[in-house]
Image: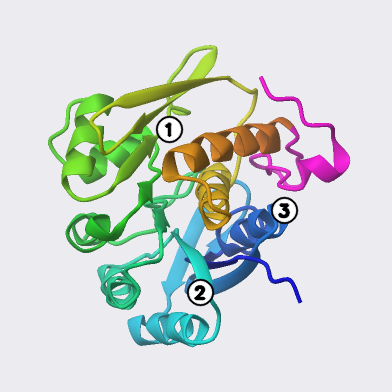
Amino acid sequence: MQSLPTLLFFSGNDPSGGAGLAADTAVALSLGCHPAPVVTAVTVQDTRQVYGYEPISAEMIASQARAVLEDLPVAAVKIGMLGSAEAVEAVQGVLRDYPHIPVVLDPVLSGGGGGMLSDIDLPEAVRRLLLPQVTLLTPNLPEALRLAGDADGCDAAGAVLRALGSEYVLITGGHAKGDEVVNRLYSPHGGCNSMRWPRLPGEYHGSGCTLAAAAAAFIAQGESPAAAARSAQRYTWNSLRAAYKTGQGQNLPDRLFWARHQETSP
């Protein structure tokens, strides 16, 4: 029987279904992959903001992941919300035993509508333990600047994050103003490739999860990290273009837009 590429996701559960493991799972199924979700935290949030979260123990996080990795041929790993430095250590310990599996990291530090999703020690733990194992890092600009420490801009942050170990760094520009969103991909060769997308109206819950999960799916299907970063941006833009409003806060990306709408890339 034909099998689907398996994606292992580390992230929190979002009860609104807009972000976290729900978003990862929808993206995986949309792009022809099998999702294997590892719960790192239980959050209290809606489409407006985060109200709190309860971390899962480091031992339970590692046990979930190892159960999957010892049974399924995981083609790529996507990491989202970890919540604590202890969770970072647990994930790093697992990944260390599977160095051949490509890793996409979305360094979730807070919710899109507000509210923290990490403890104070998490950024340093990510810098020290996870970045050396990351194939593709996908922060937005505020996250990139926070992870990079002393960097004074996007290019400086990209250089620092590459120097800390991440093979590729895709810094998204959705927080900036203007008619276009400019995303910058920093490569191992020292280059920077910018991609521009027409800015869409409104705000979106789970756009970062969508981008990182899509990149992992394209890598799992054989694309290079650079090609996967481009494909994931196009998929995410179309998901946002077809977004729908189901709650009282941000719009939710339609990760199955292709089943309901004809894709129109800019």
- According to the picture, the residue beneath numbered tag 2 turns out to be 39
Q: Earlier in the sequence, mark 3 or mark 2?
A: 3
| Label 1 Cα crowd, 10 Å radius (few <14 / some 14-19 / many 20+) | many
**Numbered disc 3: secondary structure:** helix
Residue type at mark 1 is Thr
Residue type at mark 2 is Val
- According to the picture, the residue beneath numbered tag 3 turns out to be 30
- Residue 250 is a magenta residue: yes
Label the magenta part by its dominant secondary structure.
loop
Residue at 47% x, 80% y: name it: 69
Residue at 25% x, 33% y: name it: 189
Going by the image, does 75 lie left or right of 169? Answer: right
| Label 3 Cα crowd, 10 Å radius (few <14 / some 14-19 / many 20+) | some
| x and y percentages locating residue 33 in the rendered image | 65, 62
Distance between mark 2 and mark 1 Cα atoms:
25 Å
- According to the picture, the residue beneath numbered tag 1 turns out to be 172
| Label 2 Cα crowd, 10 Å radius (few <14 / some 14-19 / many 20+) | many
Residue type at mark 3 is Ser
Q: Nearer the viewer, residue 127 or 44?
A: 127
* Quarter holding residue 151: top left
